[in-house]
Image (cartoon, grey):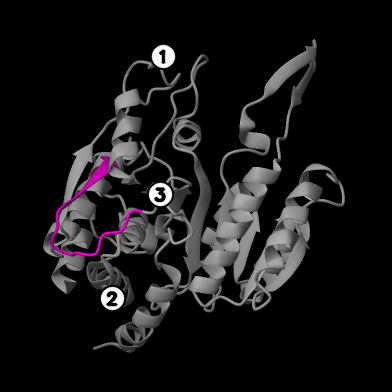
Amino acid sequence: MTMATTIAKRLIRNRSSQILGTLNSTSPASRTFCSSTTPITATMFPGDGIGPEIAESVKQVFTTAGVPINWEEHYVSTEIDPRTQSFLTWESLESVRRNKVGLKGPMATPIGKGHRSLNLTLRKELNLYANVRPCYSLPGYKTRYDDVNLITIRENTEGEYSGLEHQVVRGVVESLKIITRQASLRVAEYAFHYAKTHGRERVSAIHKANIMQKTDGLFLKCCREVAEKYPEITYEEVVIDNCCMMLVKNPALFDVLVMPNLYGDIISDLCAGLVGGLGLTPSCNIGEDGVALAEAVHGSAPDIAGKNLANPTALLLSGVMMLRHLKLNEQAEQIHSAIINTIAEGKYRTADLGGTSTTTEFTKAICDHL
């Protein structure tokens, strides 16, 4: 047994349970699954490009681990559904609403006018208000930093991504940034509750209120209100540009970061870069009505689609987050350990991890660890 494997096994249990823990504890409508034997129906969006290949890896690993789950698969349509103004059909959205849980591969929104972004459609229609992205160093996989262990929580429904743009006069366009008290309080409450229930000690609100005094000012005001209810959690406010510098210099300074939509989009990808990239980063979107949609946040990589070269780690780890949401903690722990051990040993790694293994070989290695 290599030293990397020994260290990995020592760290896996504490780290995985802390980082990938149950996500939906703040919602009164949360769906609880107490039995590990009752089959669960979950929606799966394999996605585009490499999506179907890595989705197949997830299905193989889940089957090997004995996860009691039945997948209800939905694919992106080739035509715009007028009910959603998107290539996502109404039936696809209804599947997630009905099952309350889903897993999504990478989706590429076709270029053109007259339709909404696929990801924006999911967030808006399903009211997925919080994007939760754990970012932590993987034992045995060397990057610039060895001690990254933080959570980014991004408000998912408004801000600059509200889609409200128009031309004022020829040559001048305007984009509206929407910040509401309701959405800000909701995501702040989620962030503090997450910190409390996962043994986290600090919540940092990321902002640019020194310039955007009204919008980011309202967001900070809401964070301060919520912080008063959690005196055991240290609360701080960090300007977005300073936050970026601090993360690159010393990511260990942060614990839980909560922020409006655009900042969260940028900071969460920055954090992924600290630990090896989006191919290693899990993500889960939380809805107010108990819906949880886990997803791989990397691109669809059409250049390697169908070539058996894709790395399924991000979607697998997102699947682990989904299992913990469903309280299938035993299977989640087994799969998480198998992924970490496979990467730590270094024998089977895909090209983006510095190896030569195919998607099939990497997936088989994970299954062998189970």
Mark 2, residue position = 341
231 to 112, vertically: above or below: below
Q: In the visual, does 251 lie left or right of 45?
A: right
Q: Distance of mark 3 from mark 2, alpha carbons?
A: 32 Å
Between label 1 and label 3, give the one nearer the viewer.
3
Q: Residue at x 43, y 42 (%)?
A: 299
Q: Please report whichever mark, 3 or 2, sits nearer to the chain's N-terminal start.
A: 3
**Residue type indicated by callout 3:** Gly
The circle on residue 82 is 1
**Picture layout, residue 183 above or below residue 136:** above
From the viewer's side, name the closer residue of 10 and 92. Answer: 92
**Magenta region:** 31-45
Residue 213 in view in this figure = yes
Query: Mark 3–mark 2 contact, CB under 8 Å?
Result: no
- Kind of residue at badge 2: Asn
In the image, 335: left or right of 143? left
Quarter of the view holding residue 281: bottom left
Q: Is residue 18 magenta?
A: no
Q: Is residue 110 above or below residue 221?
A: above
Measured in 3D between alpha carbons, the distance from the residue under mark 1 to the one under mark 3, in whole angstroms, is: 26 Å
In-front residue for pair 114/256: 256
Q: Position of residue 328 (x, y in %)?
A: 26, 65
Determine which residue is flagged by label 3: 290
Would you say the residues marked 1 and 3 are in contact, meaning their CB atoms lie under 8 Å apart? no
Q: Is residue 33 magenta?
A: yes
Q: Amino acid at mark 1?
A: Pro
Label 2 neighbourhood size at 10 Å, few (<14), some (14-19), many (20+)?
many
Chain-order first, disc 2 or disc 1 = 1
